[in-house]
Image (tube, grey):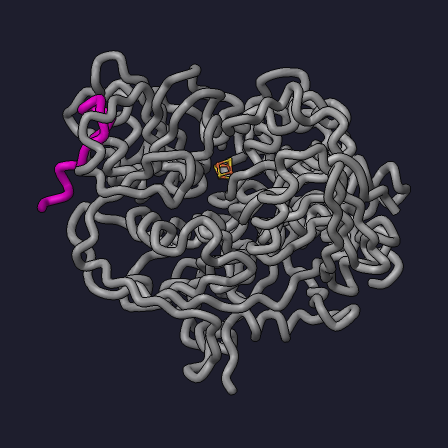
Amino acid sequence: MGKTIAEKIFEAHLVDEPFGDVSVLKLDRVFCHEITTPTAIQDLVARGKDRVFDPDKIKAVIDHVTPAKDSKTAMQGKILRDWAIRHGIKDFFDIGRNGVCHAIFPEKGFVRPGFTIIMGDSHTCTHGAFGAFAAGVGTTDLEVGILKGVCTFKTPQTYKIAIIGSLKAGVYAKDIILKVIQELTVNGATNMVIEFTGNVVDEMNMDQRMTLSNMAVEAGATSGICLPDMTTVEYLWDFIKDEYESKEAALADFSKFKSDPDAEYAKTKTIDVSELCPLSTFGYKPDNVKPVSEMKGTKVDQVYIGSCTNGRLEDLRIAAKVLEGQKISEGLRGIVSPATPDIYSKALEEGIIKVFMDAGFCVTNPTCGACLGMSNGVLANGEVAAATTNRNFNGRMGKGGMVHLMSPATAAATAIKGEIVNSNLYAN
Amino acid sequence: MKEFKGKVLFLDRSDINTDEIIPAKYLTEIEKIAMKPHLLEDLKMEGFDPITDIDGKAVVVTRDNFGCGSSREHAPWALEVNGIHVVIAPSFARIFRQNMYNCGMLAIELDPDVISNIFAEFKAADTQISVDVEALEISIQSADKNKKIPFEISGFDKELIQTGGWVEYADQNY
Ligand code: SF4
C-alpha cells in the first residue's frame, strides 16, 4: 500500500510512539511570534529550563502588533527580543525588517518540502503550500518545541481535495478556498490533513498555494498540503542552489515526499471550479459563504487588504488593477498592509502603492494589525468590514463588528462602491 | 492532578470558537489570572449571561467543534482560572483539545446522542458532574436523577493528566 505525503513526512521524523497512540516527531522549524511565545518563554524561565534546542531552527518575528501600541504589547515584544538575543536566534525580525509570520518565513526560504514545522499560531498550515507538514499549536507544545525540538501529533488521516477545471477571469485562490470551506464546513477536516491536488493547484504559483493552504484550518484541518513540484523548486531556488546540482535534482529529492498513486485517503472530494464565481462570507463562521452577487446592498465601513491570506505581492497587484484611476467610496475607510517589507518595496517600485494612495487608501507598515482586531483599524460596534483575511468570528476585528471575507479583487471593488460587489475583472 | 468535579455550565451551541472563549484583545495579558473576568464574554447565546452564569461552575458540557479557531492556549487558561477543568463535547478542534491535555485538563469526547441526552435530561436542573480518570467514568447528578457514563481517553492523554503536563514529560524523555 502506498503512502500519502503526510505519512511519509511522519515516518521520516518519528522519534517515539509513547503508549502507541501518538507520534512524537522531530521538528525542522519552530516559528515564533510575540503574542504566543512570551508566555512560553516565561514558563520555561520559571521552570529553570530557559534553553533552546537549536537557535538556527528557531525563527522569530514581531508581527501581530507592531509598532507596539501600548505598554503591554511593548513588553511582549521585549520578552521575545531579549530571548532571541540571549539564545543567539539570528533569524529574528524586528521593526523595519518584520512582516506577517506566514508571509515572511516562506519568503526568506525557511520552508522546504518534507519539513515539520510548528508555531503558536493556527494559520501555520499555510506552509503546507511547500509540501511541508506545518501545524499550529498551543503554548505548551510551542514550549516543548523550543526546548526539545519535538512535538506530538496523532497520525493524521488525509482528505484529498482535487481542484479541477479552469477558473474564470476574476476568480481566485481565495474564492476556491472559501468554496472548499463551504463544502467541508468548519469541522469537516478536523484531525485531518487536506492534500490539495488537481490541475488548478498544479497551475498555481506559490502565493496562490499559500492562500489555499492558509485557510485549511478554517475547515478544522491540521495542515493543508500541496505537493512539491517545479513551481516549488523555482520559488526556493535562490535558497537551495548550493545544495543541489540542478533544479531537476532538487525536484527529484523533494519528490520522495510526494504521495504515492496508491496511497490511502480517509476521504476524497473533487471540486470543478470552472463555474465558480467570486465568493464572500456573510456570517460569523468561515463556512457561511455566498456568491458576491447575492451580497448586493451590503454596506461596508472599512475595507482591509492584507494578512497572511492575501497580503502578498500578487494580491496587491490584483487589487491595484481594480483601483487604478478610481476613488474609494465617500465615508469608507480603506486600509492596505503589504505583508512584508519586501512586498512593500516591490509594490512601491511597481507603482502599486501610489495607486492605493491615489484611491484614498491608508497604507500601513507590514503587520497583522486589523486582522485580529488589536490595532491598526479596529472596528467600532456595529461596523462592517470587507477583508481579505481568513477569519470572520464575531468580534474578530473589533467587538460588535462584522467581517466579510473575500478576495483582494472583490475587496477593492467593494471599496470603490461602498457595498459588496464583484470586481470588473470578473466578466460574467 | 487537578480536580475534575463540580457544577455544570451548559453551552448549547456548536462551533464555539476561541475568540468567543477569550477575545484576542486579552492576548496581551501575560498573567493567566488577568483573563478571569473575560471568559466567554463575547459569546452571544440565548439564555447565557457570562456575568452571572460562569461563577461557581467547574465543568462545561457543550456541542460539536468546541474551541475552533485560534491556537491560543489562553482559551484553556481562561477556563482554568475560573475553576473549569473539564469540557465535555461530541468533538473538539484539534489544537484546543491538545492544549487542554497539555495543561493537565480534560477534554472528553462523547457520542453526540449521549451529549443530546445529557442536555435533555440535565440542562434545566442544578447539575453536578464528577469525572473519575482512573475508572474512566463520568457521574452526573441532579436533585432527582443520576447517571454514570463511561468515556475513553488515550494512554498518552492520561499520562499528561496524571503527571501534570507535557513539558516535564518531554524534557525527561527526549
Ligand atoms: S495576519 Fe491575521 S490570521 Fe494571519 S497570522 Fe496575523 S493575525 Fe493571524
Q: Farthest bottom residue?
A: A1
**Residue B28 visible from this viewpoint:** no
Q: Tell me which corner region of the image, top left, top right, bottom left or bottom right, holds residue A313.
A: top left
**Residue A137 visible from this viewpoint:** yes
Residue A73, position in %: x, y? 64, 23
Q: Nearer the viewer, residue B41 or A39?
A: B41
Residue A335, position in %: x, y? 36, 24
Q: Nearer the viewer, residue A240 or A42?
A: A42
Question: Magenta residues?
Answer: A413-428
- Prevailing secondary structure of the magenta residues: loop
Q: Is residue B173 above or below residue A96?
A: below
Residue positioned 44% across, 38% down in the render: A391
Residue positioned 35% across, 42% down in the render: A288
Q: Nearer the viewer, residue B89 or A301?
A: B89
Residue B83, position in %: x, y? 78, 33
Left or right placement of residue B83 versus residue B15 in this view: right
Left or right placement of residue A286 versus residue A136 in this view: left
Q: Farthest front residue?
A: B144
Q: Farthest top residue?
A: A331
